[in-house]
């Protein structure tokens, strides 16, 4: 199995990514760290513990990392994910404890303890990862690849041209992109191919387990805010595509292209510029996702909910 550290900000789609990462035997989840993004870092850490508890996984350490971006002011995604960051279902007290370490220290310790390079999956703002690489430049050699949900080859969501995770901390995203560690990017252009349509929701509901019911409640809330904010007919399940791609690379096609992060544009700060048509004089520096195999993706995601829900 691929050893993985999951850095996240749950978040409805992050929650589903956690389920996929713990369910599939191709992934060995070594640590979960959280960052301020969809909600404050305290809330995202609580939500990660809630999801692991629901999945019945108690052996994976969970720690809270950075509580604000490197330099930008904190902006949270409560207009999509609600007051708790995971609005919809009612949660009990999680039985997964909070690791006392800072999230960045947990990532560093996990890399140091591994006998092979570890893959980092980053599905929130990139503050924790950028901070790790600033503090421990030697950790670059210990990371096999960073698979990121962020950016877009098309338009944005938080602003017309910027996707939320990159907009939230563009300086961190630029540092991670420039770090020399290989990166693969799942942008909105891919994740908007993963809409939780009525037939998908019906498949989850039909599993009939308590976990499946929680997932339906989560996805129903997520669908309502996506509809209110952007008029989407169904919500896009961004984050788990990163995990699905690690399990089965044929889930997504990608192109190796020149990629830049816009830091200065007064209206485009946080935009990702992918030179898909090789118009710029840029060395290819990133793998940028293009096309999703929707069926494969949903089979993996729904299969994970099914498997974890079994008594
Ligand atoms: C990204 O922002 C968050 O709202 C989601 O969890 C996802 O990581 C999509 O733009
Ligand atoms: Ca997220």
Image (cartoon, rainbow, N blue to C red):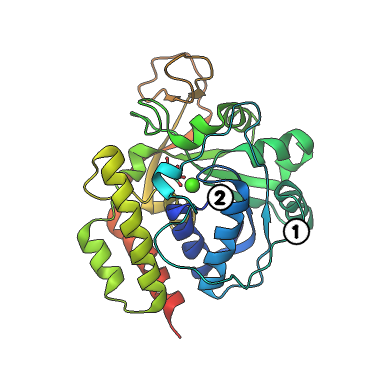
| Of the pair 295 and 7, the residue shown nearer to us | 7
Given this view, does label 1 or label 2 mark the residue nearer the observer? 2
| Location of residue 243 in the rendering, given as x and y in whole percent from the top left corner | 48, 55
Tell me the residue that label 2 is attached to.
8
Mark 2 C-beta to ligand 2 under 8 Å:
yes
Residue positioned 29% across, 54% down in the render: 294
Q: Which mark is residue 164?
A: none
| Location of residue 114 in the rendering, given as x and y in whole percent from the top left corner | 74, 58
Count of residue discs: 2
Horizontally, is 288 left or right of 116 in the view? left
| Location of residue 194 in the rendering, given as x and y in whole percent from the top left corner | 31, 50
| Label whose residue precedes the other's in the sequence (1 or 2) | 2
Q: Which image quadrant for residue 213?
A: bottom left
Residue 41 in view (yes/no)? yes
Q: Quadrant of the N terminus?
A: bottom right
- Residue 266, above or below 100: above
Mark 1 C-beta to ligand 2 under 8 Å:
no
Mark 1 residue crowding within 10 angstroms, few (<14) / some (14–19) / many (20+): few
| Location of residue 140 in the rendering, given as x and y in whole percent from the top left corner | 71, 40
- For this orientation, the residue located farthest to the front is 83
Q: Which mark is residue 115?
A: 1
């Amino acid at each position: 199995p691929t050893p993985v550290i999951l850095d996240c900000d749950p978040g409805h789609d992050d929650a589903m990514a956690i389920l996929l990462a713990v369910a599939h035997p191709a992934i060995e989840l070594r640590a979960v760290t959280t960052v301020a993004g969809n909600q404050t870092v305290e809330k995202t850490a609580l939500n990660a513990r809630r999801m692991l508890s629901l999945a019945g996984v108690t052996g994976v350490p969970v720690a809270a990392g950075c509580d604000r971006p490197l330099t930008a002011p904190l902006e949270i995604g409560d207009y999509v994910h609600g007051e708790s960051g995971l609005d919809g279902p009612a949660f009990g007290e999680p039985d997964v404890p909070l690791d006392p370490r800072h999230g960045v220290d947990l990532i560093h310790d996990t890399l140091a303890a591994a006998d092979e390079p570890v893959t980092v999956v980053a599905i929130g703002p990139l503050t924790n990862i950028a901070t790790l690489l600033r503090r421990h430049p030697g950790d670059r050699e210990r990371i096999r690849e960073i698979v990121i949900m962020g950016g877009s080859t098309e338009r944005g969501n938080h602003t017309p041209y910027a996707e939320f995770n990159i907009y939230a901390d563009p300086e961190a995203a630029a540092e991670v992109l420039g770090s020399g560690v290989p990166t693969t990017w799942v942008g909105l252009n891919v994740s908007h191919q993963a809409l939780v349509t009525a037939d998908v929701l019906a498949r989850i509901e039909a599993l009939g387990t308590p976990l499946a019911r929680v997932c339906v409640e989560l996805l129903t809330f997520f669908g309502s805010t996506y509809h209110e904010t952007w008029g989407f007919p169904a919500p896009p399940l961004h984050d788990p595509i990163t995990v699905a791609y690690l399990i089965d690379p044929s889930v997504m096609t990608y192109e190796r292209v020149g990629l830049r992060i816009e830091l200065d544009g007064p209206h485009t700060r946080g935009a990702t510029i992918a030179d898909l048509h090789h118009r710029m004089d840029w060395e290819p520096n990133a793998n940028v996702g293009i096309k999703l195999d929707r069926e494969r993706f949903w089979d993996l995601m729904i299969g994970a909910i099914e498997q974890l829900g079994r008594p």
